[in-house]
Image (spheres, rainbow, N blue to C red):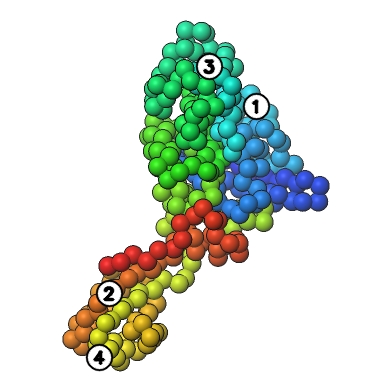
């Protein structure tokens, strides 16, 4: 277990008669990004609050950075940093003053606090804005400042609870790069997100939380392979070629109006080659071929039975 930054077993949490977490297990290897997905109200933020010592679990055990969550909460707090859903930035003071305030909370000396603040403001491209009130910052700048403040104590494990909600696409991609750099520097990142593309891009492992339980866990590729429904779509402009292809590929579903055929496929090179070889043997060429394989949108919908979050990218077909 020494290679695990987070090891939790049987976490339960209820509020009155409402069970939020129903005995979940989580194992997060050191130096990785672990993403927790789930519908709104599924318990993602509750999980972060428990693991970061903000609230207690009703039952279950967890070790964070090797420290027991129940018996050594102070050591856990010394090893972690938390960026919550809502910014901790104080808009009435400057970005630099926010950083120095955080340094004081970590009991750094004045010289060390100023050095750390200067270094992190530069790292997050906030030096020019350091003397300006944080209320004048854009959403992306506030989020960068929020994470910079989280890093003042040099945490080994960083909890990011929906860190890019409300950010524009450029700011979101900037945040992704920050996460990659944090992990490249040896940190472990526990990420909750409503953006399925975000988990796909960043996470080494993903867990889907639904109705208080982990519905599935694995790499993005492993989760996608759980869901059937991949297909190849062939489109023709010549009705004669379309009819010939339909006769050749009798297992295909026909769409006569659009002159298109759809075949079940896992999208593998071998599968595509088999389809194209059958067409070549018949002397037929498709005008357009597209491949759709299940993505995290499909996984989310299938495992949770919920609507795909509005912010997520919708399934796309890859043109070939």
Q: Residues within 10 Å of mark 3 (few under 14, many from 20)?
A: some
* Earlier residue among tags 1 and 4: 1
> Where is residue 246 shown, x and y percent of the image?
32, 89
Q: Which mark is residue 240?
A: 4
* Earlier residue among tags 1 and 3: 1
- Asked if disc 1 and disc 2 are in contact, CB closer than 8 Å, the reply is no
Viewer-nearest of discs 1 and 2: 2
Disc 4 is placed on an element classified as: helix
Query: Badge 3 is on which residue?
Result: 97
Q: Residue furthest front?
A: 136
> Where is residue 21 shown, x and y percent of the image?
69, 49
Which quarter of the figure has residue 237? bottom left
- Asked if disc 1 and disc 4 are in contact, CB closer than 8 Å, the reply is no
Disc 3 is placed on an element classified as: helix
Query: Badge 1 is on which residue?
Result: 72
- Residue 311 in the image: above or below residue 82: below
Q: Which mark is residue 236?
A: none
Please indicate whether residue 271 sits to the left or right of residue 98 in the image: left
* Earlier residue among tags 2 and 3: 3
């Amino acid at each position: 277990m020494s290679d695990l930054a987070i090891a939790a077993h049987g976490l339960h949490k209820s509020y009155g008669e409402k069970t939020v977490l129903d005995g979940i297990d989580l194992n997060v290897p050191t130096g990785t990004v672990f993403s927790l997905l789930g519908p709104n109200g599924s318990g993602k933020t509750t999980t972060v609050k428990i693991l970061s010592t903000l609230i207690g679990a009703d039952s279950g055990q967890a070790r964070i950075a090797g420290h027991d969550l129940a018996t050594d909460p102070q050591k856990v707090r010394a090893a972690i940093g938390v960026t919550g859903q809502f910014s901790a930035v104080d808009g009435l003071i400057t970005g630099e003053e926010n950083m120095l305030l955080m340094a004081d909370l970590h009991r750094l000396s004045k010289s060390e606090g100023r050095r750390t603040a200067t270094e992190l403001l530069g790292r997050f491209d906030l030096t020019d804005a350091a003397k300006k009130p944080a209320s004048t910052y854009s959403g992306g700048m506030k989020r960068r400042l929020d994470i910079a403040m989280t890093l003042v104590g040099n945490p080994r494990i960083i909890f990011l609870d929906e860190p890019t909600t409300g950010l524009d696409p450029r700011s979101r991609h900037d945040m992704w790069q920050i996460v990659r750099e944090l992990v490249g520097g040896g940190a472990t990142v526990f990420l909750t997100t409503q953006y399925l593309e975000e988990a796909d891009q960043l996470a080494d492992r993903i867990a889907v939380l639904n109705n208080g339980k982990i519905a599935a866990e694995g790499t993005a590729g492993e989760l996608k392979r759980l869901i059937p429904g991949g297909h190849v779509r062939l489109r023709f402009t010549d009705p004669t070629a379309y009819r010939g292809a339909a006769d050749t590929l009798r297992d295909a579903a026909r769409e006569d109006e659009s002159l298109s055929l759809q075949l079940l496929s896992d999208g593998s090179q071998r599968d595509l080659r088999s389809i194209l070889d059958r067409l070549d043997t018949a002397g037929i060429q498709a005008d357009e071929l597209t491949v759709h394989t299940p993505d995290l949108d499909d996984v989310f919908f299938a495992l949770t039975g919920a609507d795909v979050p509005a912010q997520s990218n919708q399934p796309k077909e890859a043109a070939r």
